[in-house]
Amino acid sequence: MSKTKSVSVNIKPLGDRVLIRHIEEDEEQTSGGIIIPDTAKEKPQEAEVIALGTGKKDENGKVQAFDVKVGDKVIVSKYGGTEVKVDGEKYLLVREDDILAVVA
């Protein structure tokens, strides 16, 4: 089971960037009882959209709408984006193109 919580962050992404927070799994122990340290865990690909940027502009200067919205659970590429830390919480700034799917 994963945990999510509503968050208000004072970061406003620019352009087609999206601020996301990875959804961490509660399980830190294998079924055999082995505890997996944080350094050995695979980076989660499921995340929650926290904030949207100002939007990408087309050739005519018109702002294109985002395909995701704040609160959406999404699947992101494994190694994309830039990690930022705000008030001890880790977030990731990714381009909308790095978002692979919306979890229904």
Image: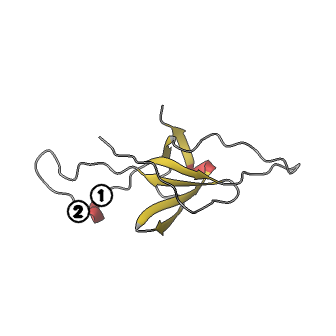
Number of residues whose C-alpha sits closer than 10 Å to that of mark 1, classed few (under 14), some (14–19) or many (20 or more):
few
State the CA–CA distance, disc 2 to disc 1.
7 Å
Circles 2, 1 touching at the beta carbon (< 8 Å): yes
Is residue 40 shown left or right of residue 91? left
Badge 1 element: loop
Residue beneath the point at 44% across and 68% down? 87
- Where residue 34 sits in the image (x, y, percent)? 13, 54
Residue beneath the point at 76% across and 44% down? 64
Is residue 4 shown left or right of residue 101? left
Q: Which residue is mark 1?
A: 41
Q: Quadrant of residue 54?
A: bottom right
- Amino acid type at circle 1 is Lys
Residue beneath the point at 40% across and 68% down? 88
Residue beneath the point at 46% across and 54% down? 21
> As drawn, which residue projects farthest toward the right?
60
Height in image: 25 above or below 93? above
Tag of residue 37: 2
